[in-house]
Amino acid sequence: MHLKKGVANYRRLTKLLYRKTFSPDWKETYWRGYVTRAEAYERRMITALKAMFTAQETEALSKLNAGSRDLLDKSEALAQYKKLATPILTDLLKVSIDNGSNLIKPRPTHAGKDAPPEKPLSAEALKWLRKMIDAAGEQITEETVQKIARALSEGYAEGESMPDIAKRVRAEFADCTARRSQVIARTETIKTSANGAIEGYREADLQQAEFLAALDDRICDECDSLNGKIYDLDDCAGEIPVHCNCRCCWIPVV
């Protein structure tokens, strides 16, 4: 037992001694490319989320005018989110896995009919993605329902007219399109990008990754304290994003 532990410790020490280190310039270039790619998908998510919230606002106001207090169909709202998020985040997950793997084991470039077919997501990656989208959809829907319920409750408590209560509902949805859409989009795209990178490193037979905090003056103390820490790949899940609007990422430990 002691011999096995000694051998394992020796192998770990050897990996540390001969581990490839990345320069600050490389890290900054990688991080900026990572954020730029995520932001492209983030913009797609924001556009889709704004359209979803606009449709939900129309539904809520129509039901309010009809005298209903149940202004949002939860199952329909969840289905709307899953429909908009699935194609965008599926594409992002594929790209993130491919980039992570190709960073370690570059594949030869091909053109035209000689290009290899697109590699489908693994069953495990698809399972993770569906679970993530379902969880986010349920949380987003529940928060929207609570915001509407609060607007109604406050309006009725104040004895307001129906037009004034409708203004409260519109104000809640204005926040959804202006602020929540951006927060949701960034959180879900960074979460997908981070997990995709880890899966790509795993495909390239790596075992660890390094936490790379956002490289600008918007970094928070919590993320800064994690910068440079090494994690086993199995321990990386759920660590990024650290908070809403987080822009940190994983880099490979080679």
Image (cartoon, rainbow, N blue to C red):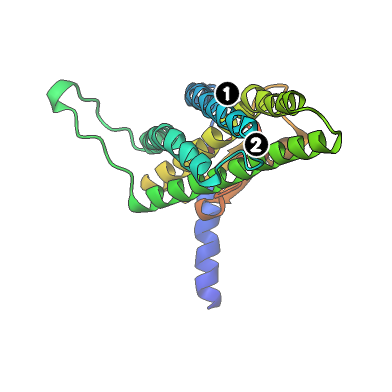
Q: Is residue 166 left or right of residue 63?
A: right
Residue type beneath disc 1: Glu
In the figure, is residue 175 to the left or right of 186? Answer: right
**Where in the figure is residue 241, as x and y percent of width and height?**
61, 39
Residue at (67%, 35%) from the top-left corner? 244
Q: Mark 1 and mark 2 in contact (Cβ < 8 Å)?
A: no
Q: Is there any visible trace of residue 252 in the rendered image?
A: no
> What residue would you read off at disc 1?
28
> What label does residue 159 carry, if any?
none
Q: Residue at x 47, y 44 (%)?
A: 198
Answer left or right for 214 relative to 96. Answer: right
Q: Which residue is mark 2?
A: 67
Query: Which quadrant of the view contains residue 120?
Result: top left
Which amino acid type is shown beneath numbered disc 2? Gly
Q: Earlier in the sequence, mark 2 or mark 1?
A: 1
Q: Looking at this view, is 14 or 113 the one in front?
A: 113
- Return the x and y of residue 156 as percentages of the image width and height: 80, 37
Identify the image quadrant of residue 225.
top right
**Image point (49%, 26%), residue name:** 48
Query: How far is mark 2 from mark 1, CA to CA?
Result: 56 Å
Left or right of 149? Residue 98 is left
Residue at x 49% of width, y 36% of height? 193
Q: How many marks?
A: 2
Q: Is residue 207 above or below residue 96?
A: below
Q: Is residue 33 above or below residue 3?
A: above
The outermost residue toward the right is 158
Element carrying mark 1: helix
Nearer-the-camera pick, 144 or 247: 144
Crowd around label 1: few <14 · some 14–19 · many ≥20 (10 Å): some
Question: Residue 87: percent from the left, percent from the top?
Answer: 39, 34
Instruction: Where is residue 57? Give x, y as percent.
Output: 59, 28
